[in-house]
Amino acid sequence: MIRRLGPVTFALVALMPAVSLADGQGEQLMKRWAGADRCSQQAYRAFPDYTAESLAKRDQAFQQCLANGNLPPRDIPPPNKP
């Protein structure tokens, strides 16, 4: 039994730095998502209507907020509601 615990313990200790690195990257990603969500909420509050003009202004405000916050742009635009 003890002989089996040795390799398992070694593997767990060897993987500890990789786990802590992934945790830091995950926290950074969550902060970026939260920032993008705040930008989306601000843009919606500024232009709540679903007219073509309001949607265009909302998208522009959203993109400007992302750029000001040094956040990556979204790959897929949000869907337009009728």
Image (cartoon, rainbow, N blue to C red):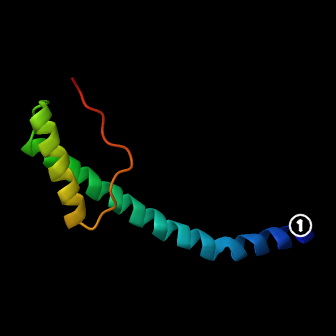
Viewer-nearest residue: 3 or 36? 36
* Quadrant of the rendering where the C terminus is positioned: top left
- Where is residue 42? Give x, y as percent: 14, 49
Packing grade of label 1 (10 A; few <14, some 14-19, many >=20) is: few
| Residue topped by disc 1 | 4
| Figure quadrant of residue 18 | bottom right
Is 3 above or below relative to 53?
Answer: below
- Figure quadrant of residue 76: top left
Measured from the top left, where is residue 58 in percent x and y? 15, 44
Amino acid on which the number 1 mark rests in the picture: Arg
Q: Residue at x 55, y 72 (%)?
A: 20
Task: Judge from the rendering whether residue 49 lies leftward or rightward of residue 80; answer left or right.
Answer: left
Taking the spot 16% from the left edge, 38% from the top edge, the residue there is 55
Taking 35 as reference, is 20 left or right?
A: right
Residue 17 lies, in percent from the top left, at: 61, 76
- Where's the N terminus, which quadrant? bottom right
Q: Is residue 62 above or below residue 69?
A: above
Is residue 11 positioned above or below 47 on the image? below
Observer-nearest residue: 6 or 24? Answer: 24
Q: Nearer the viewer, residue 35 or 49?
A: 49
